[in-house]
Image: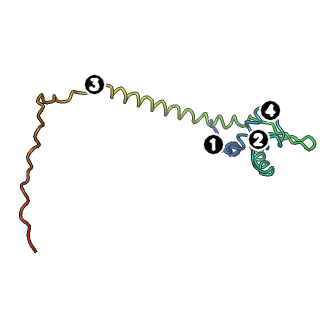
Amino acid sequence: MVNYKDPHLDLIFAALSDATRRGVLAQLGDGSQTVTELAQQYEMSLPGFMKHLAVLEAAGLIARSKEGRVVRCELDAAPMQDAAAWIAHYQRFWTDQLDSLGRYLYHKEEIASCPTPSSPPKSASAAPTPSPPKKSGARGPTRKR
C-alpha cells in the first residue's frame, strides 16, 4: 500500500521539483564531487547553491562529507524508491485509463468504417432543379404617419 501522508515523501518531491537540484543529482549519478565542482555549472552564488544542497540533504538524496576544507557530495538514490513506488501506484490507473480510451477509439473506428446506406439516386438530367415557389406574396402598402 502506498503511504499518502508521508512527510519524507513530501521532502523528496519538493527536492525533485527544481531543475537545479535535478541537475545536481544527475551530476552525482556519475560519482561523488566537491561542492565547487558541482556549483561551477550554475550561475548563482555559492550560498544560493548551498541552499539547494541543503534541500537535497534534508530529503536524504545526497550525503555530504568534509575532508579538511573540501566538502564532497555523494548521491543516495534509496529515498527515490519511495517516490517511484508512489508514481507506480498511479501509473496503473493511467495505464487502465489509456487502455480504455484505446478500446473506445478502436470501436469508433470500426463503426465509422462500416458501409453506410447509399444516398438517393441523383437526377439523370443536367438541368438545375427549380427552387420552390415562395409562400408569401409581394409586400403590401405601408401606412403614412
User: Counting residues from the N terminus, which is met first, the one under dot 3 or under dot 1?
Assistant: 1
Q: Count neighbours of disc 4 (C-alpha within 10 A) and say few if under 14, some if 14 to 19, many if 20 or more.
A: few
Q: What type is the residue that disc 2 sits on?
A: Gly
Question: Which labelled disc corresponds to residue 4?
Answer: 1
Up-down: is 50 above or below 92?
below
The one of 20 and 131 positioned closer to us in this rendering: 131
| 3 sits to left or right of 136 | right
Contact between labelled residues 4 and 1, with CB atoms less than 8 Å apart? no
Residue 95 horizontal/vertical position (percent) = 53, 31
Q: Is residue 114 visible?
A: yes
Residue furthest out toward the right: 68
Q: What type is the residue that disc 1 sits on?
A: Tyr
Q: What residue does disc 4 label? A: 31
The one of 123 and 11 positioned closer to us in this rendering: 123
Q: What residue does disc 2 label? A: 60
Task: Please tell me whether mark 3 sits on a helix, a strand or a loop.
Answer: loop
User: Counting residues from the N terminus, which is met first, the one under dot 1 or under dot 2?
Assistant: 1
Q: How many marks?
A: 4
The CA span between labels 4 and 3 is 63 Å
Task: Please tell me whether mark 1 sits on a helix, a strand or a loop.
Answer: loop
User: Counting residues from the N terminus, which is met first, the one under dot 4 or under dot 3?
Assistant: 4
The CA span between labels 1 and 2 is 19 Å
Question: Which labelled disc corresponds to residue 115?
Answer: 3
Q: Nearer the viewer, mark 2 or mark 3?
A: 3
User: Counting residues from the N terminus, which is met first, the one under dot 1 or under dot 4?
Assistant: 1
User: Counting residues from the N terminus, which is met first, the one under dot 2 or under dot 4?
Assistant: 4
Q: Count neighbours of disc 3 (C-alpha within 10 A) and say few if under 14, some if 14 to 19, many if 20 or more.
A: few
